[in-house]
Amino acid sequence: MQLAENIRQKRNQKLNGNQDLSDLERRLIEKDKKEHELGDKNFIDYFRKMTNEREGSNYNSWSSALNYLESYTDGNIKFSELNETFFNDFKKHLQTAKSKRSNKTTLSRNSAVSYFNKVKAALKQAYKEGILQTNLNLQIKPIEPEETRREYLTIEELNKLVKTPCNDILMKRAALFSALTGLRFSDIQKMVWSELEYIKGQGYRINYDQKKTDNVEYHDISEQAYSLLGEPGERSQKVFDGLIYSAYNNRHLHQWIGAAGITKSITFHSFRHTYATLLLANETDITTVQKMLGHKDLKTTMIYAKVVDRAKREAANKIKLDL
């Protein structure tokens, strides 16, 4: 590094001294100058810009990652200061950091996995844009995820919930809609009527507003899922207007599940797990499930395949003879 800096200084001295320069020397000087300017840029500012381009639940995850990155760096670290050592240290920090929600608990491993992957994605993008001269993303290993039990409902349990009254009717409709579509709470909460479309011969689907690409993205939903939406409103009106995620509303959710005689630890996100598990249990191929869930990585979808395999084993073990 010192040798490279000495060469750069000599070139600049030659340039400032108005000495004759070859075309190659001029190009090298300009290249050095550009790399120096890019290296002075603040990586945190770059990460913040990428965060602000995200939407919905993806924005929330990127925002949380930014929060931990800002705390660790005091909001300032140059691109030229980035290296494997820094990111390996940051990786260790995430695995021992306190949760921002409570100082009494440590950040969950899978949250640390998600946040560190966002950082790696930013490094990959910076390399593509020529800000980084080295693809640090390839040099840094991700945090290994912890395999967790993903609770889901059987079709029998879902039907019990359909027949069980809930104090929050809006929450009940949204939860059942998630089980029939696989949509996250945040996506259901922000959905407006203009995004819904009926195509003759094909059925209902949700069209997503495209800001980064000209490609049309949509999510097919069943007629039964559509029937949970109620009477259509104004195009700009939210479909589940008034749907709120809070401890108070979650209490209604838990009471409803308990009233149906279900003892599993079910959260709203469990209805998305239920959708994925039921698709696979009905022999939908894994790549289709991946697309329906919007997973970028097939490995994420494969977790549900393991859930289905475990359920099959448990079902097989229930058949016993008095031998």
Image (cartoon, grey):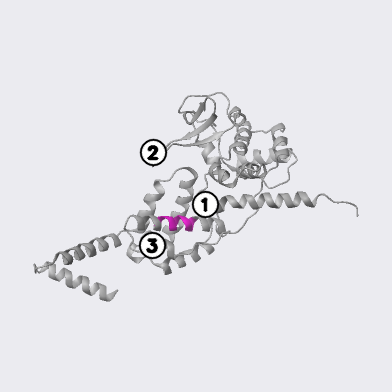
What is the C-alpha distance between the residues marked 2 and 3?
28 Å
- Quadrant in the picture for the N terminus: bottom left
To which residue does mark 3 refer? Answer: 135
Can residue 84 be seen in this snapshot? yes
Residue under numbered circle 2: 214
Q: What residue did someone put label 1 on?
A: 297
Percent x, y for residue 172?
63, 34
Residue at 72% across, 39% down = 157
The image's mark for residue 67 is: none
Judging depth in this view, the residue of 218 and 258 nearest the camera is: 218
> Who comes first in sequence, dot 3 or dot 1?
3
Amino acid under label 3? Answer: Asn
Density class for disc 3 (Cα within 10 Å; few <14, some 14-19, many ≥20) is some
Which of 170/17 is in front?
17
Sequence-wise, which precedes: disc 1 or disc 2?
A: 2
> Looking at the rendering, which quadrant does residue 12 occupy?
bottom left
Q: Which amino acid type corresponds to the residue marked 2 in the rendered image?
A: Asp
Question: Could you tell me residue 73's position as x and y percent?
Answer: 40, 62
